[in-house]
Image (tube, rainbow, N blue to C red):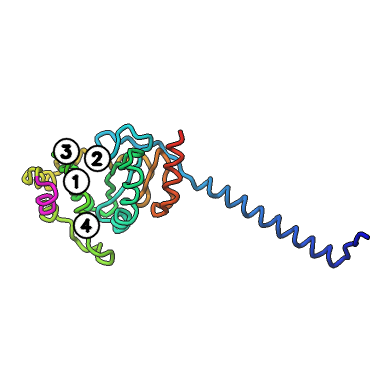
Amino acid sequence: MRCKMNNKKIVIFTLVIFAAIVALVMVLNKGDKTTQETVTVNHPSIDNQPTMGDSNAAVSIIEFGDYKCPSCKAWGEKIFPQLEKDFIETGKAQFSFINVLFHGQESMLASLASESVYKQDPESFWDFHNAVFAAQPASQNHDEQWVTTEKLVEIAKTHAPDVDLKQLEEDINTGGTIEEVKIDDQLVKDTNVQFTPTIVINGVMVEDPFDYEAIVSIIDKGLEK
């Protein structure tokens, strides 16, 4: 004999169905939100930008970074090494760095110096780049002035030994590489960079640069094309 559902069970069943519908709507809305939060941009030109990795790689990764930014230092220490191991050293991706000037004069000095090093000796750029970030003090003291011409020349003396230090000092003090810095600043504006670090992968701006799984997902999509 078939059992007939009583009124109480009907009410409970109706509530269960209603809850299931609400949950489904929330999931669908979450999916829509994720899609809406994916920001695509015209992938910035990396012509004459410091770049490591295979120039023919299918994926281009760009970091918009500021040498005065503690988060940029943290990203370089926590995320970049794995990214380099998994994708750059394997020839799947190339990586470029573009200067951002969010922290005023000190950002400008560091950018002028990095452009001078890159212009004089591209091979030593990354060693100098990493050493400048390594010289950044603890995050709670990052607002203190630490980027000076003397400090940058001191770093270059050890980490960019083939660079003409007098030329480097002149480029920093007189804006000898200001045109290169202006190019970066225009790319920052064209790409609507609001935070540092900002990571752009094949024209997709990563919402959370510290979410390595999200970065891998975007790279994998680029490798599938």
Helix, strand or loop status at disc 4:
helix
Amino acid type of the residue tagged 3 in the rendering: Lys
Q: How many marks?
A: 4
Residue 119, numbered circle: 3
Which residue is depicted at the point 24% across and 40% down?
A: 50
The reply to whether discs 1 and 2 touch (Cβ–Cβ < 8 Å) is yes
Q: Given this view, does label 1 or label 2 mark the residue nearer the observer? A: 2
**Region in magenta:** 154-161
Q: Which residue is mark 1?
A: 114
Amino acid type indicated by mark 4: Ala
Residue 50 circle label: 2
Which mark is first along the chain, 3 or 4? 3
Q: Secondary structure at mark 1?
A: helix
CA neighbours of label 2 inside 10 A, class few (<14), some (14 to 19), many (20+): some
Q: CA distance from mark 2 to mark 3?
A: 9 Å
Q: Would you identify the image quadrant in which residue 154 lies?
A: bottom left
> Is 197 inside the magenta-drawn segment?
no
Which is more N-terminal, label 3 or label 2?
2
